[in-house]
Image (cartoon, rainbow, N blue to C red):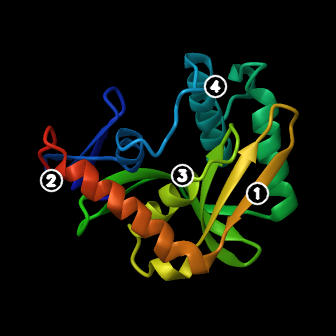
Amino acid sequence: MTPDLQFDPATHTYQWRGKVVPSVTQVLKDTGLIDDAWYTPESARRGQAVHVATELDDRGELDESTVHEKVMPYLLAWRKFRAETGFTPVLIEQWVYNQSAQYAGTVDRVGSLCGQEVILDIKTGTAQPWHAWQLAAYQYCFDGFRKYLRRCVYLKDDGTYKIELFKPENMAADYQIFQYARFTWQHQARRVV
């Protein structure tokens, strides 16, 4: 992490060198590309708890006795994914920033999957079109971004998982959709970036 990029978890805001910048999910949500009509406070809390549990587990810092019984199946699904695929994280919950487009975000994982470098997002819901755009935006925050493949791992409450593979040939188009959203977000009358 660079000291130029700061994140405030209480307000979920990023600052680059003291200036507030939009997050990837903020851009997608504010421009209507994320439909959160089906999200509930409970699902949001569950998703956050799953992210914390998988992060601590990957860092070797998890006290399993602190994991809520409703979160445990998702953690077991994550462990199953790692065991069956050999996924090895190199970066865990990494803040990223795209300096030319001026947006930030937190990448769930960057690592090695089946001998390929991947940017990976962990989800507890169902597959949505915006997941490809979100990961493309994260991908463009990295130097040498073309070497990474994009994957989502959908963890299920029955201890299973599903992997979504996003095609490399769609990367530029997926990023272009995000860029259109970012441009719209930036130029709305109430925005000052």
Question: What is the C-alpha distance between the residues marked 2 and 4?
Answer: 32 Å
Type of the residue with mark 4: Arg
Instruction: Locate residue 124, reporting x and y percent.
Output: 68, 37
Circle 1 SS class: strand
Contact? badges 1 and 4 (CB < 8 Å): no
Q: Which mark is residue 163?
A: 1
Earlier in the chain: of badge 2 and badge 4, it is 2
Front residue of 23/131: it is 131
Residue 1 in view in this figure: no
How far apart are labels 2 and 1 at the CA level?
Answer: 36 Å
The label number, if any, that marks residue 46 in the structure image: 4
**Residue, disc 2:** 17
Q: Quadrant of residue 111?
A: bottom right
Mark 2–mark 1 contact, CB under 8 Å?
no
Q: Which amino acid, mark 3? A: Trp
Mark 1: which amino acid? Ile
What's the residue at 44%, 82% (across, down)?
A: 144
- Observer-nearest of 151 and 27: 27
- The amino acid on which the numbered mark 2 sits, given as a three-letter code, is Arg
Mark 4 and 3 residues: CB-CB less than 8 Å, in contact?
A: no
> For residue 140, which quarter of the picture?
bottom left
